[in-house]
Image (cartoon, rainbow, N blue to C red):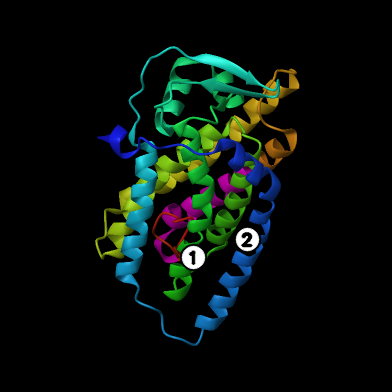
């Protein structure tokens, strides 16, 4: 069934690569425009009543949960021969069977190959995994819509929420344009966490309040995701300092480390404020929808 529905998971990888290489910087302008619109909407809403938006928000969250879930659905791997292939002596990728989706590609590479392969050899740009990697980069534009619901419903908009959305958009496009190998870690973790997080928010938007322990677990997952990102960045740096071929530029690596380190600090601070401070000092009690 899955193969029938998604039998055409393919992209014109050459055209996509050229587009991202030439226009990835547009993500910076989108992020700036996003921040300006968000804060303008906040001022607009100050003297107005909050919008209800319960059903639209429920549908929005459910849609993102389904999208993220599909990308992580095929986690059972096929132990088939793997070839390592070099392209133009600069891009090295793992050449897996064509039907490998992103979850399969990640689990197979991490589970059966040395760590070097998963952080230094890019996914095959002609594979379905590349389709989902491209979808991931584009989805970061769509996810900016999260903030619309926060602002128009007059919910607290914390710095972590809009900073996370803006910065992830820019980094995702920059990493995509150079086929950053370690991106398979970042994309898979993000898809997995989002499939859980947006499902949780679908229920809360509908008026169903899951146990508080669940929101704590989701925030812990988000925080762990950021800490793994920092660890992967340090690992790649160590590999590159040994002059080993690794598909990630130093500029992208520096940006990656700075972003994940800042996220780790902000998410740990959020976790403390939300779940560890005395009750009277708490201002939030839900996992960050990156966040609300």
Residue 162 as seen in the image, left or right of residue 104: right
Q: Quadrant of residue 55?
A: bottom left
Disc 1 secondary structure class:
helix
Q: Is residue 268 above or below residue 243?
A: below
Tell me the tag on residue 147: 1
Q: Is residue 273 magenta?
A: yes
- Badge 1: how crowded within 10 Å, few (<14), some, or many (20+)? many
Disc 2 secondary structure class:
helix
Q: Is residue 215 visible?
A: no
Quarter of the picture containing the C terminus is bottom left
Residue 229 as seen in the image, left or right of residue 109: right
Q: Nearer the viewer, residue 40 or 232?
A: 40
Residue that protrudes farthest toward the top in the picture:
81
Residue pictured at 51% horizontal, 67% vertical: 157
Identify the mark nearer the N-term, 2 or 1: 2
- Badge 2: how crowded within 10 Å, few (<14), some, or many (20+)? some
Q: Is residue 86 above or below residue 292?
A: above
Q: Position of residue 170 (x, y in %)?
A: 63, 51
Q: Nearer the viewer, residue 12 or 85?
A: 12
Q: Nearer the viewer, residue 219 or 94?
A: 94
Q: Is residue 42 magenta?
A: no
Q: Is residue 19 above or below residue 253?
A: below
Q: Which residue is mark 2?
A: 30
Segment colored magenta? 258-280
Quarter of the picture containing the N terminus is top left
Q: Position of residue 209 (x, y in %)?
A: 26, 60
Residue pictured at 31% horizontal, 63% vertical: 58
Of circles 2 and 1, which is in front? Answer: 2
Q: Is residue 225 above or below residue 47?
A: above
């Amino acid at each position: 069934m899955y193969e029938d529905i998604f039998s055409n998971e393919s992209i014109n990888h050459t055209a996509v690569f050229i587009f991202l290489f030439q226009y990835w910087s547009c993500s910076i302008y989108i992020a700036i425009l996003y921040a300006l619109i968000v804060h303008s909407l906040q001022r607009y809403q100050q003297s107005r009543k909050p919008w209800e938006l319960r059903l639209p928000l429920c549908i929005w969250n459910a849609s993102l949960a389904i999208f993220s879930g599909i990308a992580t659905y095929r986690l059972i791997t096929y132990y088939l021969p793997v070839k390592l292939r070099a392209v133009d002596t600069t891009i090295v990728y793992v050449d897996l069977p064509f039907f490998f989706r992103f979850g399969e590609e990640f689990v197979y590479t991490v589970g059966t190959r040395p760590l070097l392969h998963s952080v230094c050899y890019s996914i095959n740009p002609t594979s379905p995994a590349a389709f989902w990697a491209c979808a991931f980069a584009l989805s970061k534009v769509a996810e900016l819509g999260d903030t619309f619901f926060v602002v128009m419903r007059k919910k607290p908009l914390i710095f972590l929420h809009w900073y996370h959305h803006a910065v992830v958009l820019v980094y995702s496009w920059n990493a995509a344009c150079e086929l950053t190998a370690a991106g398979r870690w970042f994309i898979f973790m993000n898809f997995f966490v989002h499939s859980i997080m947006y499902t949780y928010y679908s229920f809360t938007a509908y008026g169903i309040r899951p146990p508080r322990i669940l929101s704590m677990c989701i925030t812990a997952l988000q925080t762990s995701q950021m800490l793994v990102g920092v660890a992967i960045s340090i690992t790649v740096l160590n590999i590159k300092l040994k002059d080993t071929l690794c598909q990630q530029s130093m500029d992208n690596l520096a940006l990656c480390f700075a972003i994940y380190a800042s996220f780790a600090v902000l998410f740990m601070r959020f976790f403390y404020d939300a779940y560890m401070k005395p009750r009277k000092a708490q201002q939030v009690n839900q996992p960050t929808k990156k966040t609300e």
